Amino acid sequence: MHVITTEMKKEFVKWLLNTYQLAQKEHTWLLNYLSSTNEQLEKVHFVDVFEDTHKKRIILHTNCSHKPGHFEFNLNGNILGEPEKTFHNIRRNPEEHVFVKLIYRDKAQSMEWGDICEAYSTPKFTGFEVAAQLILDQSFETFNIMQLQKEIDNALETGDKALFMKLTDQLLHTENKLVKSF
């Protein structure tokens, strides 16, 4: 049996927040709160699939998912879309377990996710699913490149040299990632 410690969960949240951008500061705030104490983290479970017995469910998408910034808190079948209400509910009921499903790019290949995911069964990925994930990842990177190019053009038009340099560095990094994925 795979034992998941509170320290592992804490490290995962730190990794996630350093690697992926969340759409709202409240999402970051909520994840930081959930990982703030060992007692709290013992009640937090990161899962791929919700079970009927999971009374408190959080779905959180990073900006790199198909629903950027989407947030959902399901409390016994009632869906709340507000991180603040979620925070207050969790804070008022610290003895209750919270099940968190995160959606972010490359999750299926993420060793970090594999280390802390409390899966009831390991999902088997078909060749089609792996290919679809690769296409999705490459599409996302191509979209990022196009957005960066537009922002670079705007920086040139406004004469913002610092922004231009920052964006061109990001563009090179993104292009290198895309080339390596082929």
Image: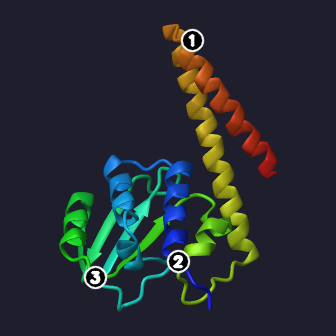
CB atoms of marks 1 and 3 within 8 Å: no
Q: Is residue 95 above or below residue 13?
A: below
Amino acid beneath label 1: Lys
Q: Nearer the viewer, residue 13 or 130?
A: 13
CB atoms of marks 2 and 1 within 8 Å: no
Question: Colour mode?
Answer: rainbow
Structural crowding at the residue carrying mark 1, measured as other residues with C-alpha within 10 Å and reported as few (<14), some (14–19) or many (≥20): few
Tell me, for residue 90, which label it has, or none.
none
Residue farthest along the top direction in this orientation: 159
**Residue 65 visible, this orientation:** no
145 sits to left or right of 93 = right
Residue appearing at x 73%, y 65% in the figure: 131
Residue 97 position by quadrant: bottom left
Amino acid beneath label 2: Thr
Residue appearing at x 65%, y 42% in the figure: 142
Q: CA distance from mark 2 to mark 1?
A: 46 Å
Residue appearing at x 81%, y 51% in the figure: 182
Disc nearer the start of the sequence (1/3): 3
Tell me residue 106's x, y (percent): 63, 60
Residue appearing at x 61%, y 74% in the figure: 115
Tell me residue 72's x, y (percent): 32, 66
Which image quarter holds the N terminus?
bottom right
Residue picked out by circle 3: 96
Amino acid beneath label 3: Glu
Residue picked out by circle 1: 161
Tell me residue 35's x, y (percent): 40, 65
**Residue 173 visible, this orientation:** yes
Q: Nearer the viewer, residue 19 or 65?
A: 19
Q: Nearer the viewer, mark 2 or mark 3?
A: 2
Q: Is residue 85 above or below residue 179?
A: below
